[in-house]
Amino acid sequence: MTKQSEIGTLILRLVIGITFLIHGLDKFQSGIGNIAGWFESIGLPGFLAYIVATIETVGGIAVILGLGTRIVSFLFILVLAGAIITVKSAVGFTGNGQMAGYELDLALLAIAVHLAINGSSLYSVDALLRKK
């Protein structure tokens, strides 16, 4: 990868990492039990809320640090695809006024796919570990 490509990929890594970290923290801070209840109300097992919030929080930190970027990005793909299929597709691309649509999820999905395919080595823990 060229230096310019790596800088662009670093920016994508930071954006998706920060976004997922904040979303995961929000789930825990607003009461993960409430989120689990909402999951159940839409027909999903409540325990998935804990899994999703953990992937978002821990995965967000890992991607920011560049640790396991490809693996975590694949998990983000699963979370985003699940959100689009189970919830967001029903409200459309831009939403319905009460709930956001899947436009942001689709953009994050594209970033996650890019990172899952290409990884990100600029300023990453993975690159440091490979050197040793």
Image: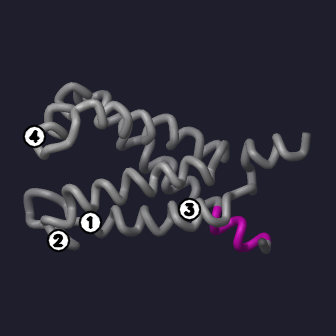
Please give the name of the residue rendered at 78% of the width and 70% of the height, measured from the top-left corner. 3
Nearest to viewer (mark 4 / mark 3): 4
Q: Position of residue 91 (x, y in %)?
A: 13, 66
Find out whether the residues at labels 3 and 1 contact each other: C-beta distance under 8 Å.
no
Q: Kindly report the distance in space between the C-alpha atoms of the residues bearing marks 3 and 1.
A: 19 Å
Find out whether the residues at labels 4 and 3 contact each other: C-beta distance under 8 Å.
no
Placement of 130 over or under 86, stated as above or below: above
Q: Amino acid at mark 4?
A: Ser
Find out whether the residues at labels 4 and 1 contact each other: C-beta distance under 8 Å.
no
Residue 10 located left or right of residue 61 = right
- State the SS at label 1: loop
Residue indicated by mark 3: 12
- State the SS at label 3: helix
Q: Kindly report the distance in space between the C-alpha atoms of the residues bearing marks 3 and 2.
A: 25 Å
Would you say residue 6 sits in the magenta stretch?
yes
Find out whether the residues at labels 1 and 2 contact each other: C-beta distance under 8 Å.
yes
Mark number displayed over residue 102: 1
Nearest to viewer (mark 4 / mark 2): 4
| Along the line of sight, the residue nearer the viewer: 110 or 30 | 110
Residue 27 seen: no
Find out whether the residues at labels 4 and 2 contact each other: C-beta distance under 8 Å.
no
Q: Kindly report the distance in space between the C-alpha atoms of the residues bearing marks 4 and 2.
A: 20 Å
Q: Quadrant of residue 84?
A: bottom left
Please give the name of the residue rendered at 28% of the width and 30% of the height, measured from the top-left corner. 47
Question: Nearer the N terminus, badge 4 or badge 1?
Answer: 4
Residue indicated by mark 2: 92
Mark number displayed over residue 41: 4
Q: Kindly report the distance in space between the C-alpha atoms of the residues bearing marks 1 and 2.
A: 7 Å
Q: Quadrant of residue 128?
A: top right
The secondary structure that most of the magenta stretch takes on is helix
Question: Nearer the N terminus, badge 3 or badge 2?
Answer: 3
